[in-house]
Structure formats: structure tokens, C-alpha cells
Image (cartoon, rainbow, N blue to C red):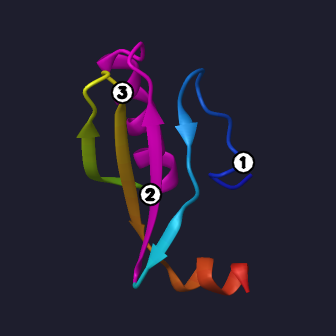
Amino acid sequence: MSDSQRSVPAGMTLEAGVVDGDWEYQPIRLPRDVSRLNATAELGLRAQFGGWELARTLLYADGTRKVWLRRKLSRMREAVSV
């Protein structure tokens, strides 16, 4: 199952991923009612099992957060996607 097909906790929204050079980016929108602890746990799981790292976070005035995860593209992933 690919990361884009993976279930997302209630309220979190996966947006379309972007490939830029050697990096793949995955933006995720976190609603205001997602606690920091739950957000940390979800992002930690993505880092541990998906190879993602935190690239950027943005806090909006309404309390929602948008985070960008990134991971280095591997030659294996490129070969599989072709």
C-alpha cells in the first residue's frame, strides 16, 4: 500500500504530493482539534515507516496547521513508478 493510499486519522487531510529534483514532498493539513501529541505520533509513524522527514510547518490564524514532509527519492522508487 502506498503512502497516498494509507488511511489518515480523522480530520487530517493528505494533499497531492510533489516531486522536486531529488525530493518528494507530501503536504498534510491538520485541523485545529488535532492535539500536538496526536500530530507528533502520526508524523513520527510516517518518519519511521515511510522514510519521511519534516520539511516545514505553517500555523494558520484559525488554528489549523499544514506540514510538509519530504523524503529523498531513491532509484528503486523511480524504477517502480515507471
For label 2, the SS is: loop
- Circle nearer the N terminus (1, 2): 1
Q: Nearer the viewer, mark 1 or mark 2?
A: 1
Residue 29 position, x and y percent, is 45, 37
Residue 4 falls inside the magenta stretch: no
> Looking at numbered disc 1 in the image, what kind of residue is underneath it?
Gln
Please provide the residue range marked out in magenta.
22-51
Vertical placement of residue 70 versus 36, above or below:
below
Disc 2 target residue? 51
Please name whichever residue, 65 or 50, is drawn nearer the observer in this view of the structure: 65
The CA span between labels 1 and 3 is 23 Å
| Number of disc labels | 3
Q: Residue at x 71, y 80 (%)?
A: 80
Residue 57 position within the rendered picture, expressed as x and y whole percent measured from the top left? 26, 44
From the viewer's perspective, is 41 left or right of 19? left
Q: Could you tell me the amino acid type at mark 3?
A: Thr
| Helix, strand or loop under label 1 | loop
Q: Secondary structure at mark 3?
A: loop
| Quarter occupied by residue 10 | top right
Q: Is residue 38 magenta?
A: yes
Residue at left offset 68%, top offset 42%: 6
- The residue at the point 36 percent across, 27 percent down is 64
Task: Give the residue type at disc 2.
Answer: Gly
**Contact flag, marks 1 and 2 (Cβ < 8 Å):** no
Relative height, residue 35 to residue 71 (above, below): above
Residue at 61% x, 32% y: name it. Answer: 8
Distance from label 3 to label 2 (Cα)? 24 Å
| Circle number at residue 5 | 1
The location of residue 23, given as percent across then percent down, is: 40, 74
* Disc 1 from disc 2: Cα separation: 16 Å
Q: Which mark is residue 64?
A: 3
